[in-house]
Amino acid sequence: MRESSSCQDRSLEREGCVSVKMMKFWLLSLLLIQSWCSRCAEAEIFTSIGQMTDLIFTEKELVQSLKEYIRKEESRLVQIKSWASKLDDLTHTATADPEGYLSHPVNAYKLVKRLNTEWAELESLVLQDSADSFISNMSVQRQFFPDEEDEKGAAKALMRLQDTYKLDSESISKGRLPGVTFNALLSVDDCYDMGKTAYNDHDYYHTVLWMQQALKQLDEGEEAVVSKPDVLDYLSYSVYQMGDLHRAIQLTRRLLAVEPTHQRGGANLRYFERLLGKEMRESNTEQPPVTEAPIEFRTYERPVGYLPDRDIYEALCRGEGVKMTTERQKKLFCRYHNGNRNPRLLLAPMKEEDEWDSPRIVRYLDALSDTEIERIKEISKPQLARATVRDPKSGVLTVANYRVSKSTWLAAEDDPVVARVNQRIEDITGLTVETAELLQVANYGVGGQYEPHYDFSRRPFDSALKADGNRLATYLNYRDEPEAFKSLGTGNRVATFLNYMSDVEAGGATVFTDFGAVVRPRKASIRKTQKQFNGTAVFWYNLFRSGEGDYRTKHAACPVLVGSKWVSNKWLHERGQEFRRPCGLTEVD
């Protein structure tokens, strides 16, 4: 009875251990789900390189936690292996002559003891869960993890860089990018996932580019989880969607040669061949020879997008089509600027360089000290959120796909540095900052950009109003966007002051699509004797003196190819500038 009771107790103990482990598992799972759900509301980590740097340290902490788990598991397995080795030798001897072995009373005692006590201890050792600490750490850190939307956004960002800078998939996959410090490669599975992201968005152009790259790397012998038939399945159908029926048939035949029983491949091949036969009969032509040439970056034409001046914008981002002529360069100068004898600039005038003559764009060197830049980044980073734009109809700030960055707004009361920067902007421009918007700080993430836009609110052009002299800017400029800036009560954005707070290794320029100007982000001012790491700033007027919008100032922030782009900007408004920037005699003064 005692033996039966003891067995029952151990059975209950095992069941209790299992129950406790299951309870822990479900509690930890619940924590993970809750963390994941709360994280879903934030998402968009990929839109800020500054915030993504925190993920590096999060991952480092998880690696340390994982290594500690492995150490404990290895220690436990060493003990279990030692038991197994010892008992293997023992049972080998005992089973050779069981009665002879047990005739020794000590062996009989030790057998009973082992089965009653020591095997129970081994059972407890096997049931030990070293993963609790690691899983607990995971549940805490998971709330900061990127989610599916982040992964999708980062993949689309790579495709955006590919399009803007005309990079083939292999250049990106092999990490051959300008200005890179750390090399990074994409595996077959990475390329396949890129292609699937595009495919799920019905973007067959990029699906073809990335599935072709995955296939190329598979053909070169790279190992992967994904199979060649899977890649060929997506590639052949996407090629068909791009209108290349002959190549779709060729790829589908290759798919069936690898996997003859592939049902969808077989059905697709029959469908493609019927379509081809119909085309040949209608055009009365013979089937052209099947090409074996691989699909390249320029094999298919990129579909037309929603952006009317996309080609101009992207060409300027690549440094093509810049309309800086020799005659224009002769009109550009550099000078010391004292803000119309502003007392704060008399002894330490600003160094001013002309970037463009008309409309006039100037750059100021040493506009921010390195200490000021780091302080602004420090107080901004915890507050960064997906950058928004003001809806022209409602006036409400909303997220837009054409602006990929994170930003925050800083008031003068937030920190003495912000107040000092605001005062410096007023001293340099001669415009009051009392009616300006707060200082906006932005950090651009993977492929971060802001497509062509105007900083001022605008309305449809009405030539009939020209005869009536200057227009009333506040009323008429809001005619098409009646709510834009209305809540501010400070009129339209008269000027933009943009601080560059980081150097960017490649990409990230500010381009003006109307007149073909490129202004590159530049934190450092280069001198003959030394390199000063102080921020530069550019300034331009968005409105003529009449209050009319200067439509030539349409501009864009090019995608950041390599690097992390930090900027801060101040939008100065009309109100309060009546005597600082009086109206001109004509509409376009």
Image: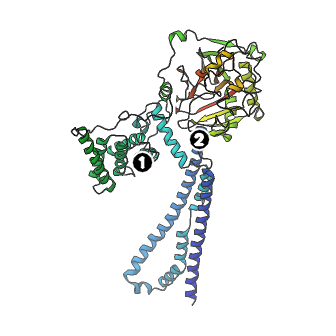
Q: Is residue 470 visible?
A: yes
| Label 2: which secondary element | helix
- As shown in the figure, which amino acid type bears the numbered disc 1? Asp
Quarter location, residue 431:
top right
Identify residue for label 1: 189
Q: Nearer the viewer, residue 3 or 416?
A: 416
Q: Nearer the viewer, residue 363 or 275?
A: 275
Residue 469 percent coordinates (x, y) = 69, 15
Picture mark count? 2
Residue visible at 32% across and 40% down in the picture: 244
Asked if residue 579 is positioned above or below residue 292 in the image, the reply reads: above
Quarter location, residue 208:
top left
Instruction: Give the class, few, some or many, for how many residues have Cα within 10 Å of label 1's Cα (few <14, many ≥20).
Output: some
Quarter location, residue 338:
top right
Q: Is residue 492 visible?
A: no
- As shown in the figure, which amino acid type bears the numbered disc 2? Thr
Residue 132 percent coordinates (x, y) = 59, 62
Q: Quadrant of the C terminus?
A: top right
- Mark 2 or 1, nearer chain start: 2
Identify residue for label 2: 53
Between the C-alphas of marks 2 and 1, the distance is: 24 Å
Instruction: Give the class, few, some or many, for how many residues have Cα within 10 Å of label 2's Cα (few <14, many ≥20).
Output: few
Residue 504 percent coordinates (x, y) = 55, 29
